[in-house]
């Protein structure tokens, strides 16, 4: 081989080595214009969309199959075991009789199915009304439901109660979080208020005690704070952020109020994501304050 031929050969080897190394690095997803990182992001968003669709499907199926708005049952509420010291409650999942006002009230649609799905996503305990009942589990001074809440709080060392309700579409908010008072000495969740606020910071400017502050002595939030000595918050969710697909046997559909109402799925998911996030963060904070000790 002549001297020049060696030069060309050596340069060719260098060039091919560089091309090989570049492809190898790109193939490992570390750099390069064809980096699979972008493909990964696309895959992630596809996965997120699929899991979002799955969450909405599950919520709808629970509401359609397990919640009987207008059918009584011996056990009008259900209870699901969890593995974190948070209890999610949906006391108006079906039609109920408010004794203090001597009248029947329609169900807070999709609050029971949302509570069950959130329990599945976070590991929280869940108590929910699944059948029509002759008592108001939340508003009556005493109810079988409140007794069950008290029993669960003691037995499973629950430290936080999230009580879920439904507000009509016409309300001027997406959510209204009732914490009894804005005064630091009276608030129902002094240790977790900031976590709740942060979870909804990009969702809605005002958050607490807009219309329903849960300060009536009979609310589950008051019951949790004053009778059980734990922290609690009441979440009122607008119809547009929870009613995945209105059921034909709902009080609203029977009254001819938008019988085919369907919330925007993304709005429901936006709410589910935030509630899930705050439940998990509250659990983390509880764990830090009450570390598990082995003796
Ligand atoms: Zn309610």
Image (tube, rainbow, N blue to C red):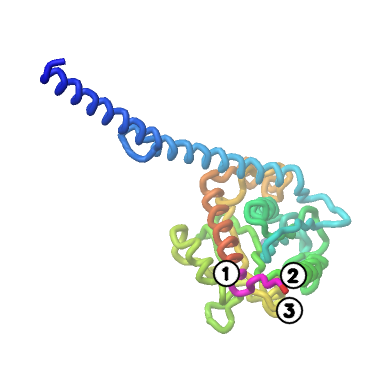
Figure quarter occupied by ligand 1 = bottom right
The correct choice, above or below, for 159 with respect to 105 in the image is below
- At 77% from the left and 63% from the top, the residue drawn is 103
Q: CA distance from mark 2 to mark 1?
A: 18 Å
- Label 1, on which residue? 285
Query: How many badges with numbers are in the image?
Result: 3
Would you call the spot at circle 3 few (<14 residues within 10 Å), some (14-19), or many (20 or more)?
few
Nearest the viewer among 149 and 125 is 125
Residue range of the region highlighted in magenta in the rendering: 286-294
Q: Is residue 12 magenta?
A: no
Residue 87 drawn at (x, y percent): 69, 64
Given the current orientation, which residue lies at the most extreme bottom position? 185
Observer-side mark, 2 or 3, equals 2
Q: CA distance from mark 3 to mark 1?
A: 23 Å
- Label 2, on which residue? 153
Q: CA distance from mark 2 to mark 3?
A: 11 Å
Residue 185 drawn at (x, y percent): 56, 84
Observer-side mark, 3 or 1, equals 1
* Residue 97 figure quarter: bottom right
* Residue 142 figure quarter: bottom right
Would you call the spot at circle 2 few (<14 residues within 10 Å), some (14-19), or many (20 or more)?
many
Tell me if residue 99 can be seen.
no
Which circle's residue, 2 or 1, is located before the other in the chain? 2
**Dot 1: what SS?**
helix
- At 83% from the left and 66% from the top, the residue drawn is 144
- Label 3, on which residue? 227
Observer-side mark, 2 or 1, equals 1
Which circle's residue, 2 or 3, is located before the other in the chain? 2
Which circle's residue, 3 or 1, is located before the other in the chain? 3
Quarter of the C terminus within the rendering = bottom right
């Amino acid at each position: 081989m002549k001297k020049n031929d060696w030069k060309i050969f050596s340069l060719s080897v260098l060039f091919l080595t560089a091309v090989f190394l570049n492809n190898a690095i790109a193939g490992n997803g570390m750099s390069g214009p064809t980096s699979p990182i972008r493909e990964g992001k696309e895959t992630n968003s596809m996965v997120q969309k699929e899991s979002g669709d799955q969450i909405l499907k599950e919520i709808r199926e629970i509401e359609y199959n397990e919640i009987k708005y207008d059918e009584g049952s011996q056990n009008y509420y259900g209870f699901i075991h969890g593995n974190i010291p948070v209890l999610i409650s949906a006391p108006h999942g079906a039609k109920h009789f408010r004794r203090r006002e001597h009248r029947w009230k329609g169900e807070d649609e999709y609050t029971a199915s949302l509570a069950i799905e959130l329990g599945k996503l976070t590991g929280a305990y869940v108590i929910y009304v699944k059948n029509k009942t002759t008592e108001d589990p939340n508003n009556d001074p005493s109810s079988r439901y409140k007794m069950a809440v008290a029993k669960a709080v003691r037995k499973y060392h629950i430290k936080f109660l999230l009580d879920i309700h439904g507000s009509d579409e016409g309300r001027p908010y997406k959510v209204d979080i009732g914490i009894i008072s804005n005064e630091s000495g009276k608030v129902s969740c002094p240790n977790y208020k900031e976590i709740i606020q942060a979870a909804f910071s990009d969702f809605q400017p005002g958050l607490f005690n807009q219309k329903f502050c849960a300060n009536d002595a009979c609310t589950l939030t008051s019951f949790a704070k004053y009778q059980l000595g734990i922290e609690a918050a009441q979440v009122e969710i607008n119809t547009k952020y929870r009613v995945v697909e209105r059921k034909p046997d709902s009080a609203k559909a029977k009254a001819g109020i938008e019988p085919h109402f369907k919330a925007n799925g993304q709005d429901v998911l936006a709410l589910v994501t935030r509630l899930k996030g705050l439940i998990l963060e509250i659990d983390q904070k509880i764990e830090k304050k009450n570390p598990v000790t082995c003796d």
